[in-house]
Amino acid sequence: DKSAMKERYGLTPSQFIDLKGLMGDSSDNLPGVYGVGEKKGIQLLKEYGNLDEVIKNKDLIKGKLGENIRNNIKEALMTRELATINRDVPIEIYWTWLWKINRGI
């Protein structure tokens, strides 16, 4: 839930999706930004607010980190999109079918 997310990561759920975009997810083979792990990703999100603002301010980020962000924008955006769960999917439920299943018919 939101409070557990805030307590563990210091982020909102939408920021957590941006964190995935930054750091990637090796278990799902999602690249993210090379060299950005959880700690650095959280630091960037706390400073800039979200992935879009990190990208917007990419030229202000110095050193190898800034270079990696500038070189991996496409990957970060793709990973964020793939890590986003679409909760606005229309689902049709056939109550008659469920009623029959529950009754063993």
Image (spheres, rainbow, N blue to C red):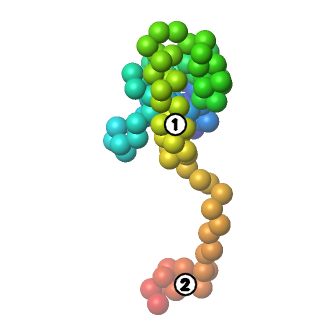
Mark toward the start of the polypeptide (2 vs 1): 1
Within 10 Å of disc 2 (Cα), the crowding (few <14, some 14-19, many 20+) is: few
As drawn, is 52 to the left or to the right of 31?
right
Residue depicted at x 47% and y 90%:
105
- Percent x, y for residue 88? 66, 57
Residue at 56%, 33% (x, y): give it. 18
Residue 73 visible from this viewpoint: yes
The reply to whether residue 16 is visible in this rendering is no
Instruction: Indicate which disc residue 2 carries.
Output: none
Q: Secondary structure at mark 1?
A: helix
Q: Which residue is mark 1?
A: 74
Q: Position of residue 52 (x, y in %)?
A: 64, 30
The numbered disc on residue 97 is 2
Between 103 and 84, the one lying in front of the other is 84
Closer-to-camera residue (84/96) = 84
Alpha-carbon span between mark 2 and mark 1: 44 Å
Picture quadrant of residue 39: top left
Residue, x 45% and y 33% (percent of image)? 32
The reply to whether dot 2 and dot 1 touch (C-beta < 8 Å) is no
Foreground mark, 2 or 1?
Answer: 1
In which quadrant of the rendered image does the N terminus lie?
top right
Up-down: is 75 above or below 98?
A: above
Image coords of residue 92 (percent x, y): 63, 74
- Which residue is most to the top? 62
Q: Left or right? Give the position of 23 relative to 50.
A: left
Looking at the picture, which amino acid does disc 2 mark? Trp
Give amino acid for label 1: Lys
Q: Nearer the viewer, residue 104 or 35?
A: 35
In this picture, residue 30 sits left or right of residue 93: left
Residue 37, position in %: x, y?
Answer: 41, 23
Up the image or down, 104 lies above or below 31; here it is below
Q: Name which residue lies at 48% across and 18% down.
A: 67
